[in-house]
Image: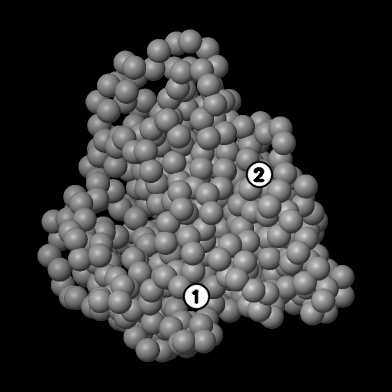
Amino acid sequence: MRQSSTLDRRSFIKAASRFVGGTAAAGSLPSLGPSTTTARARSQPNAPTPEPLIQPPETRSANGMLDLTMTAAPGPVQLADRAFTGLLYNGAYVPPTLRARLGDTLRITLRNNLTSGLDRPGYVGPVCTGAGTPSNLHFHGMSVSPQGNSDNVFVHVQPDDTFQYQVRIPASGRQGPGMFWYHPHAHGFVNDQILGGLSGALIVDGIEQLFPLLRGLPERLFLIKHVKLDDESELVSINGQINPAVAMRSGEIQFWRIAHIGASEFFKFRVEGMPLYVVATDGHALSQPHKTTEFFIGPGERIDAIAVGPPAGEYPMRTIAFQNEAWRPPEPVLQLAVISSSGSSSSAKLEDEILRQRVTGPQWIEEVRAAPIARRRTLVYSRTADRKLFMIDDRVVDEARTDQTVKLGETEEWTVVNTDQQYHSFHIHQTAFLVTEVGGVSWSDDSLRDTFSVPPATDQRPGVLKVVIPFTDPVIVGRFVYHCHAVDHEDKGMMGVIEVVA
Ligand SMILES: [Cu+2]
């Protein structure tokens, strides 16, 4: 029923956009009466019979080297019954998952072919202007060098240009095995390029050494992307599929790697009637699996979890409506996938076995917890009333300015104060951090993060996030950035530059 009403609404908006004679970019429509302000346009297209979940293609390192050329260019995308022009790596809306091991080097040649104009008359595609723009590559979550041709977001690769990245993953140190991702980070163009489809998964193999139970389990990636089309409809896909079916046998154990590799949406979701056992967040292992039934995942965040095939039946993975922006109604509930379980084995005893697992080896988080705080800093997030500028400490980013200088070896406590009545997030490059306080309440995390959502301000007080950040890994010396990972905010200024000096 919901689908037919949103389809009606979609045709209505299409008609309206024809009437105003232009693209129906958000905010550009004239007032269409109360229905447009009370209903959100997000909708899933018709996908009558769920297709089996497809795993993205992979490119693996060999002899210590992962060699790949990635060309960013416009190209066709089909999501269920919707076709549009996206911005793609090597022609794919879900480009290859890069798989490497500690000690490997990623040697990636980026070719920027974002040259042709997408805003031609008759263009039907994402609300995006990613063509004719500079691009680059960021290796999100990785404790690698930010300098030279490594994970350096100050490099801007112009249209028609090529740049070769060489990112050495240290064989030992802070960087461990886990789930990471890659995406463009050319300031001012990030949102459009990720919305268009430019993002993929990056896995450092070896997590089974931390949790031997994971060895040999079938691995399922769930790469969440979101796109807004110029008729105002919004699509949320997993591995480039709308509402795919995940097949399990009752009592079967699978290893699920859920990553939000989209641009700017915050999601809360659950699998109805099916818990998951989280083993890592943002590529950092917990000390033991943690049973969870609801997940909050902002742009850039990842969750690795053990899933156990439930009794035979269908279990929808659905978003949960929640209030993000105080001035808009909550997003409607969306079905993201359906878990289709068959067979009759019992899964009851498996839960005990999973919850008994303990991570092997020393964990970085223990050092972070024990480190003395060398310095405390506060970042204040704000925006202008017209939403054109998003700021940290009352200023927009300037890539030539250094906002924070930190000494290598020190651990600091940063407080992020959100004066805006919507979610933002805190992300810093090259190092993970420990979350210690959320919304004025102390927060006990069992794993590190590299991205975390900052709660909205209320009428009474700002939303506050406290984190402890270790600047202790020599590989991170150099200049890099911290920012809100709702990247439309980052593009509009909500970013700062940090330099770690030896
Ligand atoms: Cu933000």
Q: Residue 387: horizontal and vertical position, in percent? A: 51, 83
Residue linked to disc 1: 489
Residue 165 horizontal side relative to residue 170, left or right? right
Q: Name which quarter of the figure residue 25 lies in.
A: bottom right
Crowding around mark 2 (Cα neighbors within 10 Å: few <14, some 14 to 19, many 20+) is few
Mark 1 vs mark 2, foreground winner is 2
Residue linked to disc 2: 1
The kind of residue on which mark 2 rests is Met
Q: Nearer the viewer, residue 257 or 470?
A: 257
Is the residue 247 above or below the residue 396 in the image?
above
Residue 437 horizontal side relative to residue 490, left or right? left
> Which residue is painted at 34% across and 86% down in the image?
393
Residue 169 visible, this angle: no
Q: Name which quarter of the figure residue 483 lies in.
A: bottom left
The kind of residue on which mark 1 rests is His
Q: Label for residue 131?
A: none
Residue 136 horizontal side relative to residue 452, left or right? right
Q: Are marks 1 and 2 in contact (CB under 8 Å)?
A: no
Q: Residue 339: horizontal and vertical position, in percent? A: 54, 30
Crowding around mark 1 (Cα neighbors within 10 Å: few <14, some 14 to 19, many 20+) is many
Is label 1 in a helix, a strand or a loop? helix
Residue at far front of view: 34
Q: Residue 61: horizontal and vertical position, in percent? A: 58, 43
